[in-house]
């Protein structure tokens, strides 16, 4: 995706606010006493961490240019580490290095996916809405 796409993105603020909402939801789910049950799936908890951070990175990668994505990756990795420490302090959630690894791996895979056409989904949605005269 060219740098021009980022200049054309009219939904950038909406995208950022939705991304911040995703972060709030992620942190909330990670810190509540009774998180969604993933015990029915082998490594379900780790898969949830991995997928959550992959999608979170991919969402923000649609808004931030490739050169800013290193900072984005570092910020999300630090978020994942911080949430794990916060879980350890709750008394009802567990601190796990494996969760940190799953979060970090998710960010890295999200970063790799951001170099594919998947990083244009928000732009394509916006163009579709413009063509349908809904924007």
Image: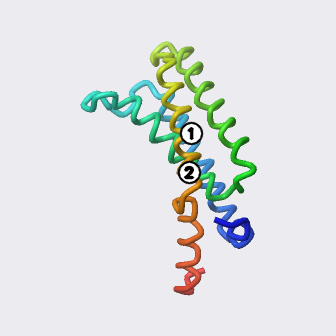
Q: What residue is drawn where x is 64% and y is 55%?
A: 17
Q: Is residue 2 above or below residue 89?
A: below
* Residue mark closest to the camera, 2 vs 1: 1
Q: Residue 114, position in %: x, y?
A: 58, 53
Residue depicted at 27% across the width and 32% down the height: 41
Q: In this view, does 100 lie to the left or right of 72?
A: left
Q: Mark 2 points at which residue?
A: 58
Rendered-image quadrant of the N terminus: bottom right
Q: Which mark is residue 48?
A: none
**The quadrant where residue 11 appears:** bottom right
Task: State the residue at coordinates (41%, 29%).
Answer: 46
Residue located farthest toward the left when viewing the structure as drawn: 40
Q: What element carries label 1?
A: helix
Q: Residue at x 54, y 15 (%)?
A: 88
Spatial CA span between label 2 and label 1: 10 Å
- Along the line of sight, the residue nearer the viewer: 79 or 105: 105
* Residue bearing the label numbered 1: 108
**Quarter of the image with the C terminus in it:** bottom right
Q: How far across and how far down the image is residue 14, in percent?
A: 64, 62
Foreground: 71 or 86? 71
Q: Which of marks 2 and 1 is nearer the N terminus?
A: 2
Estimate how packed mark 2 is, as few (under 14), some (14 to 19) or many (20 or more) residues with alpha carbons within 10 Å: many
Vertical placement of residue 39 versus 72, above or below: above
Asked which secondary structure carries label 2, the reply is helix
């Amino acid at each position: 995706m060219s740098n021009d796409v980022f200049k054309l993105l009219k939904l950038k603020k909406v995208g950022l606010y939705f991304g911040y909402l995703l972060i709030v939801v992620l942190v909330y789910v990670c810190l509540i006493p009774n998180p969604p049950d993933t015990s029915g799936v082998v490594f379900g908890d780790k898969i949830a961490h991995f997928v959550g951070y992959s999608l979170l990175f991919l969402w923000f990668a649609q808004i931030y240019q490739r050169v800013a994505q290193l900072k984005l990756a570092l910020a999300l990795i630090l978020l994942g580490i911080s949430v794990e420490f916060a879980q350890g302090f709750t008394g009802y959630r567990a601190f796990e290095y494996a969760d940190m690894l799953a979060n970090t791996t998710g960010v890295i895979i999200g970063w790799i996916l951001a170099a594919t056409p998947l990083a244009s989904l928000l732009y394509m949605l916006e163009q579709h809405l413009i063509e349908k005269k809904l924007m």
